[in-house]
Image: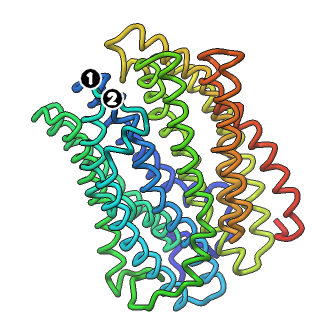
Amino acid sequence: MKNKDVIQLSDHFTLPRLMRFCLPSIVMMVFTSIYGVVDGYFVSNFVGKTAFASVNLVMPFLMILGGVGFMIGTGGSALVAKCLGEKNEEQARRVFSMMIYLTFILGVTLSVLGIVFAEPVARFLGADEEMLANCVTYARTCLIFNTFFMLQNVFQSFLVTAERPKLGLAVIVAAGLTNMGLDALFIAGLQMDVTGAALATGLSQTVGGLLPLLFFLKKDNGSKLRIVKTPMELCPIIQACSNGASELMTNISSSIVSMLYNHQLISLAGQNGISAYGVLMYVQFVFAAIYIGYAIGTAPIVGYNYGAQNHAELHNMRKKSTILTLSAGVVMVGLAQLLAAPLAHIFVGYDKELFDMTVHAFRLFSFTFLFSGFNIFTSSFFTALNNGAISAAVSFLRTLVFQLAAVLILPVFFDLDGIWISVAFAEVCAFVISLIFLAAKKKKYNY
């Protein structure tokens, strides 16, 4: 008998039902971003802006490695959701288990390589002698826990596919509270500087990766998914990685662009420019987390109905999501304009020159949010339809090609302001591309 309190992937999703199903994923991602913001707050206010700039300089490198987890999670969950839609639960469990095994293998490998090459990478990213020690210490400490970070990212998607989004939220809240508490203890209390920040982050990621692992290891967890013994098969792994390539591309592209931003900012505004950009990124994580959480929540629904060939529900999801993401964009731009000064004050209120630069930068940057939600959903939508090529194309153009062009060209005409508006320019271009792809593939997928 169907439990009315449990929303299933096979349901028809009215707007209230859709929001109920996606809300845990949205809150989960927002909470994840907020505890990242807490990291930035403690480092900036208790260690100083040099350490804050150092963490921001090396962060893109860490995000590339952790982004492999997003690739496996989103790509694998799309494949698993399709299997569930086809009523092939045994294959769904086997594919799910392969994704977890793959995460362990890649996690350990990338962690070792990252620790070994942390110093040359930091130098390549532009760390001077003043920043180098902090960059290397933070990176190496975080990389000890990288496998759990990847697992946390993988399980965020699979808990939604397993129809357990509330459990996903509970896990992230537990991890977030761990991070916040340890930040206060290690940085403010024990004065462990960037080592304390990295330890707090790593231990919280261990909580975020370990709790779902224990849940899925249980045979009687009440979910259609659990970890089973299965040989590794190349075909599902390649398909899952292909499906999730757009999410990895987003992480890699964003990291490459961040490196270029930092290079441009050093020449135009010095260390203050990097610190201001760091504040933008922390705050942007919170705003973008709403869109990413919604995409994580809707992807299994789309994947399930694609497997079940329920074209009416695919159309329903596409239409409602378009309205929701564009409406949210207008609201977010308004909020960003109002909250620019208070948010900047949290991080850099101790330095008036840096504070003024950050407020001005964020007000220009905020127009990014107008179309970014629609673009994020479009990429996720095609991932869920098992069309990794289009999903990757949208992400590649949005997060790399358009942003690289913008950050190289716009400062020539608008100086420092050209950097702050670069992402917004890229999102407008990506919005046009998203519309073109959606129109071109409408007949094929009948959405």
Asked which secondary structure carries label 1, the reply is loop
**Residue 298's spot in the image, x, y percent?**
62, 61
Please identify the quadrant where the C terminus is shown: bottom right
What is the spatial separation of the Cα atoms under label 2 and label 1, in whole angstroms?
6 Å
Q: Is residue 145 above or below residue 182?
A: below
As shown in the figure, which amino acid type bears the numbered disc 1? Gly
Q: Which mark is residue 52?
A: 2
Dividing the picture into quadrants, the one containing residue 367 is: top right
Give neighbour class at mark 2: few <14, some 14-19, many 20+ (Cα, 10 Å).
many
Q: Which residue is mark 1?
A: 48
* Labelled pair 2, 1 in contact (Cβ < 8 Å): yes
Query: Residue type at mark 2?
Result: Phe
Q: Residue furthest top?
A: 352
Q: Position of residue 181 (x, y in %)?
A: 21, 42
User: Where residue 331 sits: x, y (%)?
Assistant: 64, 32
Residue 321 appears left or right of 75? right
